Image (cartoon, rainbow, N blue to C red):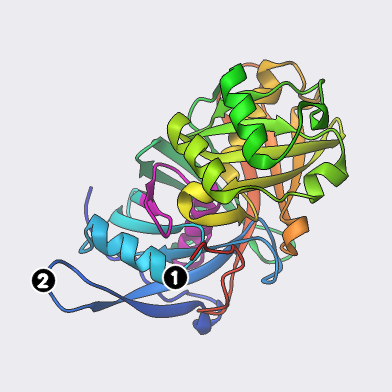
Amino acid sequence: MTTDNVPTEATDDVPTEATGNVSAGTGRHSPVPVPVLHYTAFTTDPSGGNPAGVVLDAAALDADAMRAVAAEVGYSETAFVTASDLAARRFTLRFFSPLAEVDFCGHATVATAVALAERIGTGTVVFATPAGEIALDTAASASGAVEATLTSVPTRTRPATAEELDATLAALRWRTEDLDPALPPHVGFGGVHHLILAAGTRERLAGLDYDFDALAAVMRRHGWTTVHLVHRLSPSRYAARDPFPVGGVVEDAATGAAAAAFGGYLRDLGLAPADGRVVVHQGEDMGRPSVLTVTVDAGSRRVRVTGHAVPVPAYAVPTAAVRP
């Protein structure tokens, strides 16, 4: 793959304040400014969705520098384009939370696809990620905002073990009686692993108040990226919340990777609607409403997740609370 530079400025009317510089130390060299784009994904409203940093030219950054940038930006994840082939519309992408590298991040992937579409035109882009190759189709919607549909890596799911469930419920301060028996606990994969738990009531989901360190320890032990907490509003609508303590973040406002895993879960358990389309409402309890449209096909293990992304002013206060 070539390392053609992606233009960091948009070709149309993207606000210039969506770009800011942060400093990244690279080994023994002095800190250097790194242009960071700021987008919020799975919304058309800059005050909603899940913010992500996007670095379109990270070819010169090593892993330590990328993690330092992500920590300074402070969002749940920042995406870094480390190699680009503009002619083929293929890019290599890495993701960092404020604490560590993540194999895949759905909302930062959507944000990066939209940022690229605003600079090189809409159409299909392909990202090589640590989780595998991810294709995204981008198009301008009726509102004028760019919409992106990612097609996940093949999803899979398995029942959660009694030990996994008991430890997680203790950290969440939930009881078995708080769960919806029609939606059994599973561990789902859509690029990274997520424990999927269904609350029996919307009130139980809204009252999330968990032990940050205890849940992080459980998640690290089992290799989970988030715990995907859902409540079924109807057969085709779900509310969701995603604690992300292993990334140093209390909660995600929109989690595309978990939505892909959840789509695979619904398909495998025969719970997807006949048309395969489910809408996930996330971030509402954080004051950052997000909408993720999940589409499953009975004949494919891949899941499609669709949403918008829009620029936000650089250095807006991060809305995913970062643990000190």
| Residue underneath mark 1 | 73
Mark 1: secondary structure: helix
Q: Residue 7, position in %: x, y? A: 36, 71
Residue 272 drawn above or below residue 240: above
Query: What amino acid is labelled 2 in the image?
Result: Arg
Residues 158 and 218: in front is 218
> Which corner quadrant of the image does residue 259 belong to?
top right
- Give the residue at x 37% y 52%: 100
- Give the residue at x 53% y 32%: 190
Residues 294 and 114: in front is 294
Q: Residue furthest bottom?
A: 17
| Residue underneath mark 2 | 28
> Which corner quadrant of the image does residue 229 belong to?
top right
Q: Residue 131, position in %: x, y? A: 39, 36
Give the mark nearer the N terminus: 1 vs 2. Answer: 2
- Decide: few, some or many residues near mark 1? Use Cα within 10 Å; few <14, some 14-19, many ≥20: many
Cα separation, mark 1 vs mark 2, equals: 22 Å
Q: Residue 76, position in %: x, y? A: 51, 58
Query: What amino acid is labelled 1 in the image?
Result: Val
Q: Which residues are magenta?
A: 94-119
> Which corner quadrant of the image does residue 268 belong to?
top right
Residues 266 and 89: in front is 266
